[in-house]
Image (spheres, rainbow, N blue to C red):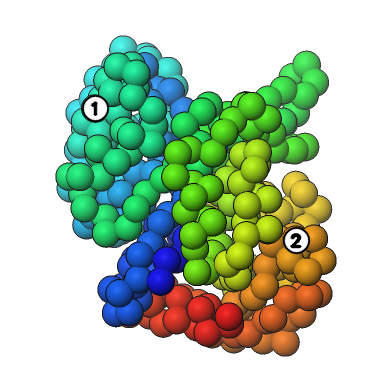
């Protein structure tokens, strides 16, 4: 059995722990196709927040309290940069984390594609799943907001971290998506999948950039594997993060039904065959999609594996 997961963000990384646990029970193979829209250059270093969240979380190196970055992190370099007045000051890199970015940047500058670099980094962390960036090409999520002299575009990370999404916002733009190509192995993985899972990640800024890579959405929609999504919304509120603010920009209701309809039923031109929601949202309907409920709080690996099992039972 081959399970492909479209994922991004901390919620997606935690979901993958459950997918991995389930896969080990049944002897399945897992491929994670990971969002790169959050990627950015900081102080000359290539930072890939979602790829690193998956790698650290599955490799046992993530900080369980913050939910992001490395456990036992120190911040000497951040303090020194601040002393120099080096911008940006709103995004900090931990000392351990910088080592990852140094290795990644050196390999990228040496001509290796991001997918090869990711595979090399994963040899240290042994995540237990195959990690593939959605694309090796530049793809960045930018946000069009109000500025002093009219609308302007800022990087998603600035909108998210610096402004906490609390700024008049008009739309999201996936810069570079129109010329990007799926990373090697992505289309092949989707084509050989027995099931495709859409993680309970932010649908607007974690999953949408993945689907924006030309050919990728079509591969999922037209592929032989059934597609099941897991709702990131429980009882009208995000499990974590600011998905509600992202959905509001799109004019989409922050609810399990709203996100399910955003993805759409495959028989109606969308993506989903199945949609797993929380018990609080039992009774939700998405046209042309089988909807069932199960506990969706990822309190530990066992609970998350039970979520995955419930999702797979839909198909």
Rounded to the nearest angstrom, the CA distance separating label 1 from label 2 is 39 Å
Q: Is mark 2 on a helix, strand or loop?
A: loop
Q: Which residue is drawn at 77% across and 24% down?
A: 151
The quarter of the image holding the N terminus is bottom left
Specify few, some or many for label 1: CA neighbours under 10 Å numbering under 14, 14-19, or 20 or more. Answer: some
One can see residue 195 in this view: yes
Dividing the picture into quadrants, the one containing residue 105 is: top left
The quarter of the image holding the C terminus is bottom right
Relative to 171, is 241 above or below? below
Residue 127 locus on image (x, y percent): 26, 55
Is 314 on the left-hand or right-hand side of 51? right
Q: Residue at x 52, y 69 (%)?
A: 195
Camera-near label (1 vs 2) is 2
Disc 1 marks which residue? 103
Residue 180 locus on image (x, y percent): 59, 30
Is 9 on the left-hand or right-hand side of 65? right
Viewer-proximal residue, 288 or 11? 288
Dividing the picture into quadrants, the one containing residue 202 is: bottom right
Residue 244 locus on image (x, y percent): 66, 57
Disc 2 marks which residue? 270
One can see residue 18 in this view: no
């Amino acid at each position: 059995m081959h399970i492909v997961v479209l994922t991004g963000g901390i919620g997606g990384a935690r979901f993958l722990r459950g997918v991995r646990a389930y896969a080990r029970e049944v002897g399945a193979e897992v491929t994670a196709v990971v969002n790169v829209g959050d990627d950015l250059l900081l102080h000359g270093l290539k930072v890939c927040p979602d790829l690193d969240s998956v790698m650290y979380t599955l490799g046992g190196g993530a900080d369980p309290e913050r939910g992001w970055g490395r456990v036992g992190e120190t911040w000497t370099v951040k303090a020194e940069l601040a002393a120099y007045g080096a911008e940006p000051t709103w995004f900090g890199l931990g000392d351990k984390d910088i080592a990852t970015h140094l290795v990644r940047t050196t390999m990228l500058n040496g001509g290796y594609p991001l997918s090869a670099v990711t595979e090399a980094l994963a040899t240290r962390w042994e995540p237990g799943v195959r990690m593939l960036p959605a694309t090796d090409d530049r793809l960045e999520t930018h946000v069009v907001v109000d500025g002093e002299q009219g609308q302007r575009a800022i990087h998603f990370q600035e909108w998210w971290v610096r402004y906490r999404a609390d700024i008049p916002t008009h739309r999201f733009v996936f810069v570079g998506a129109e010329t990007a190509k799926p990373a090697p192995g992505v289309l092949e993985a989707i084509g050989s999948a027995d099931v495709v899972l859409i993680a309970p990640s932010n649908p607007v800024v974690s999953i949408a950039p993945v689907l924006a890579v030309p050919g990728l959405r079509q591969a999922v929609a037209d592929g032989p594997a059934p597609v099941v999504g897991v709702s990131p919304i429980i009882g009208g509120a995000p499990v974590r993060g600011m998905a509600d603010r992202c959905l509001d920009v799109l004019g989409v209701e922050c609810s399990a039904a709203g996100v399910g309809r955003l993805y759409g039923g495959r028989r109606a031109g969308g993506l989903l065959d199945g949609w797993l929601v929380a018990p609080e949202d039992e009774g939700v309907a998405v046209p042309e999609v089988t909807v069932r409920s199960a506990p969706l709080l990822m309190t530990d690996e066992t609970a998350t594996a039970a979520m995955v099992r419930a999702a797979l039972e839909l198909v």
